[in-house]
Image (cartoon, helix red, strand yellow):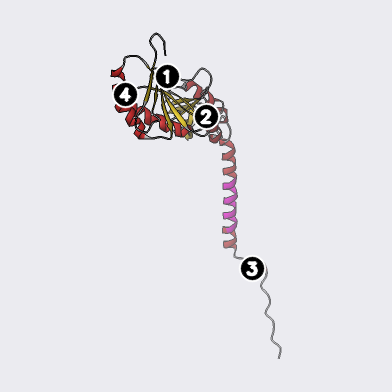
Amino acid sequence: MARRRRPRTPWWQRVSWGRLGRTLGGTGLLVALAGTVWTLSGYLDRVDTLPVERVTVEGELRHLPRETVQEVVSAHLPAGFFTLDLAAVRRDLEALPWIRNASVERVWPDGVRLRVDEQVPVARWGDAAVLNQYGEPFRPGAGTLPPGLPALEGPPGRERVLMERLLAVQARLADVGLEVAGLTEDARRSWTVHLADGSRVLMGRGMDPARLDRLVRMYPRLRAYREAPIRRIDMRYANGIAVAWVPAGVEG
């Protein structure tokens, strides 16, 4: 005897209307939330919603006017608080010759904070460039070159070596009251110390601390031996030195 098939329940009776309602309600909530976020995003992107009202500059500036920094930032401020391109502001700040590093951040609700590290000039390099304390060259621009800096001159790529050598020589010769006006190094790596009184010290190749020690020991004796100005001191000898004095009646 064949089994009788049970009638199939209509689909609308099989649906869990409570679950469906909850699903549709959750979807609607997500759509509404997405719409709100989109609307709010568009609102915040408007320049007149949150304009930048305050710019704070941190960091010691000795050679670059703060007004110059303010002008660079002001060119970006029409973008507003949220749309301000921080990377572009930083890039433009670091393009200034006297700025080594810069950082830019937003300060809620209407401010921008700048932190700038100014270059520290230690010595002139060639005719127009300046070396900072790390031996890195930069060009401060015409008319802004600080006066009185010692002068370094040498082959390209030797900036850091000569900078470190300058600092070592300055510290050592200060013990006998000698002021270093500059250093030069030729293509053969032979270097010369130029003193503020116009005399020169020929040091030969390489940085031999023993030669500096010998100069420090003997210089007071040289000054006591003759009062005439010294023109040149040659330290390229193994155990001694050669000295040339300025002849009487001749300057330098």
Dots 3 and 4: beta carbons under 8 Å?
Answer: no
Give the CA distance from mark 4 to mark 1: 24 Å
- Crowding at dot 1, Cα within 10 Å, few <14 / some 14-19 / many 20+, comes out as few
Is residue 198 among the parts visible in the rendering? Answer: yes
Give the CA distance from mark 4 to mark 2: 48 Å
Circle nearer the N terminus (2, 3):
3
Q: Is residue 65 left or right of residue 21?
A: left
Q: Name the residue under label 1.
A: 148
Q: Which numbered tag is attached to residue 93?
A: 2
Q: Which numbered tag is attached to residue 219?
A: 4
Three-letter amino acid code at the position of disc 4: Tyr
Most common SS among magenta residues: helix
Of all residues shown, which one is farthest toward the right?
Answer: 2
- Crowding at dot 4, Cα within 10 Å, few <14 / some 14-19 / many 20+, comes out as some
Circle nearer the N terminus (1, 3):
3
Which residue is at 57% across, 51% downward? 30
Q: Can you say which quadrant of the picture contains the C terminus?
A: top left
**229 falls in the magenta region:** no
> How far across and how far down the image is residue 169, in percent?
37, 29
- Judged from the image, the secondary structure of the residue bearing numbered disc 4 is helix
Q: Bounds of the magenta span? A: 23-34
Query: 90 or 75: which is nearer to us?
Result: 90
Three-letter amino acid code at the position of disc 3: Gln
Q: Mark 3 points at which residue?
A: 13
Dots 4 and 1: beta carbons under 8 Å?
Answer: no
For discs 3 and 4, the disc positioned in front in the rendered view: 4
Dots 4 and 2: beta carbons under 8 Å?
Answer: no
Circle nearer the N terminus (4, 2):
2
- Judged from the image, the secondary structure of the residue bearing numbered disc 1 is loop
